[in-house]
Amino acid sequence: MKFIKLCVVFIFHACFALPSVMASEDAPPELQSLNQETIELYRTGKYDQGVLVAKQALALAEQNFGPNHPDVANNLNNLAILYRAQGKYAQAEPLYKRALEINEQALGQDHPFVAANMNNLALLYRTQGLYALADPLYEGALAINENAFGPAHPDVANSLNNLAELDRTRGRHVQAEPRYKRALAIYEKAFGPDHPAVANTLNNLAELYRNQGLSEQSLPLYKRALDIYERALGPDHPAVATSLNNLAALYTAQGQYRQAEPLYKRSLDIRKKTYGPEHPDVANSLNNLAELYRSQGEFMQAAPLYTRALVIYEKTFGPSYPGIATILTNLAALYTVQGQHALAEPLYKRSRAIREKALGTDQLLKPAI
């Protein structure tokens, strides 16, 4: 079964939210307004509009500060994040690299903003399965943060979490576990046991254990993370939806479908309420609920959910977005189980073509992201 999972987002993990605007005090109000609009468009999944606004902001920053100012780097970073969200990795990479170069020259190679740029570029590489490129960037960011803040700072925990996520993706469970645990200890000491950053790390550690088939170890971590999110952020926060999704995935893997279904449905309801019916997170939930129904042989219920998820992804990202390949594969597997091979075969072919275009044929043999 192929579930689409979305990482939990806080300032410590830039997966959903653009980083805080780092505009100078003398930045014109128009630039600050454009930056805030960019963040809101990104948050609501309006990536095409967000790109247009981010380009305006970048042009204005360059006009006011010149081409090599940290504010320009910030706007380059924002535009790159939007391109990455669209699956336009080739457009995102040079922007991330230019932002990194600007901050290294303007602020010095050991500045925390440089570490943040390195983390963002590393995430782009990790998303593409280019782990050998991501690893030294994450390691470099960790070294910068430890040098700048000391070994027990939340930014250090963020770097540890990122490295652990890379380790988990590569199947290096032995390396990942102590990094997660160290990050968790830092967050608990810095923020207390009930902070969303703690929940984020608990969730990631639970994912590590689930990947190893250690359900008894992952279940209490998922539940504690969910409890923290609900109390800290409220029952209808998107982070709660993601946590519900992850717990449901564990129940599904255990064959506990009755426990999983209401969690997936609640996650879907939260995302619809938060983002509207056309957001990629809604597609994520639709796909996962469809996978649950397919696991139970409820094919008539699964097929329209896959189709709806596919429509949302294509509308949002275009026909070549790598995430579309997962939904195509899932829908093709459904048709295969039903013996509808004529319907399944073109979906499998299209899925493989998307993956080859995004990752290259050699990358198809690496672990799934």
Image (spheres, helix red, strand yellow):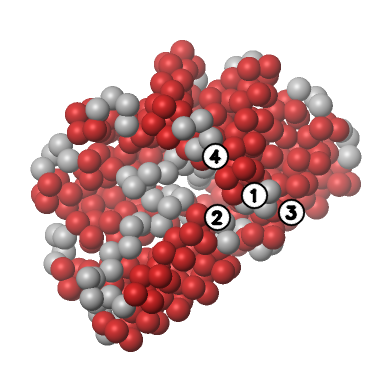
Q: Which residue is mark 3?
A: 311
Q: What residue is drawn where x is 56% and y is 31%?
A: 245
Locate residue 267: give its quadrant. top right
Label 4 amino acid? Answer: Lys
Task: Using a 10 Å C-alpha cutoff, classify the residue at mark 1 as few (fewer than 14 neighbours), some (14 to 19) or many (20 or more).
Answer: some
Q: Secondary structure at mark 2?
A: loop
Label 2 amino acid? Answer: Thr
Q: Position of residue 45 (x, y in %)?
A: 56, 56
- Earlier residue among tags 3 and 2: 2
Q: Which residue is mark 1?
A: 276
Name the outermost residue toward the front: 29
Q: Are marks 1 and 4 in contact (CB under 8 Å)?
A: no
Q: Nearer the viewer, residue 26 or 126?
A: 26
Q: Which residue is mark 4?
A: 5
Q: Position of residue 321 (x, y in %)?
A: 61, 58
Label 3 amino acid? Answer: Val
Q: Which mark is residue 44?
A: 2
- Earlier residue among tags 1 and 4: 4
Q: Nearer the viewer, residue 255 or 54?
A: 54
Q: Are marks 3 and 2 in contact (CB under 8 Å)?
A: no
Q: Is residue 118 left or right of residue 310?
A: left
